[in-house]
Amino acid sequence: MQQADLIWGLVGFFVTLMVFSYILGDNPFFRLVTYLFIGVAAGYVFLTLLEQVMWPKLVLPLFNGSLISVIPLILGLFLLTKLFPRFNRLGDIPMAYLVGAGASITMGGLMVGSLIPQVMATINLFDLSLAAKNEVPPAVQMIDGIIILVGSLTTLMYFYFSTRAKPDQPSNNRGPVIEILAKIGQVFIGITLGALFAGVYSAALTALIERVSFVWNFILNFLHPILG
């Protein structure tokens, strides 16, 4: 084992043990690793923003005489005024721009990247001419389409609460038909959350197995020259 590999192996070994120490409860070793991780992540994000965003898109255009780059510079300076209570109203201008631009980009991404493709994929499941192309029996494709359609509609019904209030009923009463559909949607939501949890648990378990395997192999490699 080379010296550099030995040093970094020891660092990874002790850091892993410090993370595993949380099994015994919160302790200074685990907090030290947490602070180290947050510091490294913050430093990496700062350098990435400086190298890939601020320098090429703000500083260099200013040196090249691009007057339009003055606008983000001014907005950035206004944003820094949020640190000072006396001038924090100036920071509302860039904050409003960021919130508006972020909301529009998010909504556009959800429509183009999620909602429309999901609708089109559901519609295509009812096109039996595509079953042969997909090498799927038409009956199986139709069943898949019905399940996805029912799941999508009933899930939307679960979040439907805007019914007209009545004197003898609470304002969030959805009616018997919609309530039944909402219960079916709740089943689909539970299945989805269960699958997501299983995926997260599987990923965490895989990471745990990898770290335990690393510790075990490092100990074996470290003791191999000593034991011959």
Image: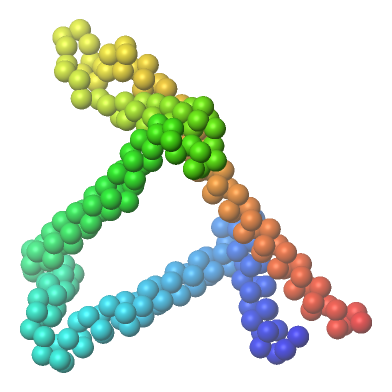
Pick the front one: 167 or 153: 153
**Residue at the far top in the pictured view:** 168
Kindly identify the residue that appears in the image at 81 percent across and 73 percent down: 220
Quarter of the image that includes the C terminus: bottom right
Colour basis: rainbow
Give percent across and percent down for residue 168: 20, 7
| Residue 224 visible to an observer of this rendering | yes
Give percent across and percent down for residue 12: 63, 74
**Residue at the far right in the pictured view:** 228
Q: Classify residue 148 by image quadrant.
A: top left
Give percent across and percent down for residue 45: 37, 74
The vertical placement of 223 against 185, above or below, is below
The vertical placement of 210 against 13, above or below, is above
Q: Classify residue 57 by image quadrant.
A: bottom left
| Residue 85 visible to an observer of this rendering | no
Kindly identify the residue that appears in the image at 49 percent across and 43 percent down: 133
Kindly identify the residue that appears in the image at 28 percent across and 50 percent down: 112
Kindly identify the residue that appears in the image at 50 percent across and 42 percent down: 134
Give percent across and percent down for residue 42: 39, 73
The vertical placement of 170 against 113, above or below, is above
Taking 15 as reference, is 185 left or right?
Answer: left
Taking 226 as reference, is 186 left or right?
Answer: left
Quarter of the image that includes the N terminus: bottom right
Taking 189 as reference, is 1 left or right?
Answer: right
Q: Classify residue 46 by image quadrant.
A: bottom left
Pick the front one: 33 or 130: 130
The vertical placement of 88 against 119, above or below, is below
